[in-house]
Amino acid sequence: MTEEVEQLYARALELPVDERDAFVREACGGRPELRDELLSLLTHADAAGRFFDDLGGAVRAALPALDADAAPCDPMIGRIVGRFRVTALLGRGGMGAVYRARDDRLDRDVALKLLPPYADDDPGVVERFLVEARAAGTLSHPNVCT
């Protein structure tokens, strides 16, 4: 994603949904490829927002069932990674694991994603991670941390 696309996308996300289309069409002028890319990104952002709305409800419903006193079974729990103290495993997938961690300097909990060990040997995995991180950084939703 180019810097121009990122900037226009971020500005469009700040607008009410019903004003985004007109903003994009005006901002892109006679550049249909740019317009189409932005409109596609915004469509996906709306779908992601609905997904996270649904997911947030599911997570809140599942939280009381978690046993806070259960012994940690992941070796990362309790470790220090940079300035973050890993406190819980949130999820694991093909691109690594996501942990809840404590940033004591900023006095807040954060989500910390760690790539799998084989990622060092595969530049494609690292590039996909960076693309994902950039995309996540553009999202603005109460159920998404960036």
Image (cartoon, helix red, strand yellow):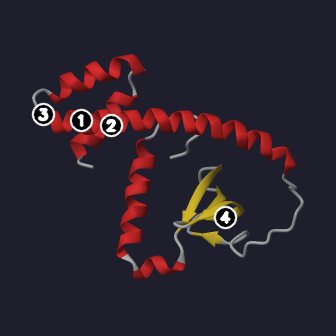
Query: Which comes sooner in the sequence, label 3 or label 1?
Result: 3
The answer to whether the residues at label 2 and label 1 have Cβ atoms under 8 Å apart is: yes
- Does residue 91 appear in this view? yes
What is the count of numbered marks?
4
Q: Identify the secondary structure beneath mark 2.
A: helix
Residue designated by label 2 = 40
Q: Position of residue 21 (x, y in %)?
A: 30, 22
Residue designated by label 3 = 31
Q: Amino acid at mark 2?
A: Ser
Q: CA distance from mark 1 to mark 4?
A: 42 Å
Q: Amino acid at mark 3?
A: Arg
Q: Residue at x 23, y 48 (%)?
A: 2
Q: Position of residue 118 (x, y in %)?
A: 49, 80
The numbered mark at residue 59 is: none
Of badges 3 and 4, the one in the foreground is: 3
Q: Identify the secondary structure beneath mark 1.
A: helix
Q: Amino acid at mark 4?
A: Arg
Q: Amino acid at mark 1?
A: Asp
Vertical placement of 30 versus 111: above or below?
Answer: above
Q: Residue at x 37, y 57 (%)?
A: 131
Residue designated by label 4 = 85
Q: Quadrant of residue 7?
A: top left
Q: Identify the secondary structure beneath mark 4.
A: strand
- Does residue 141 appear in this view? no
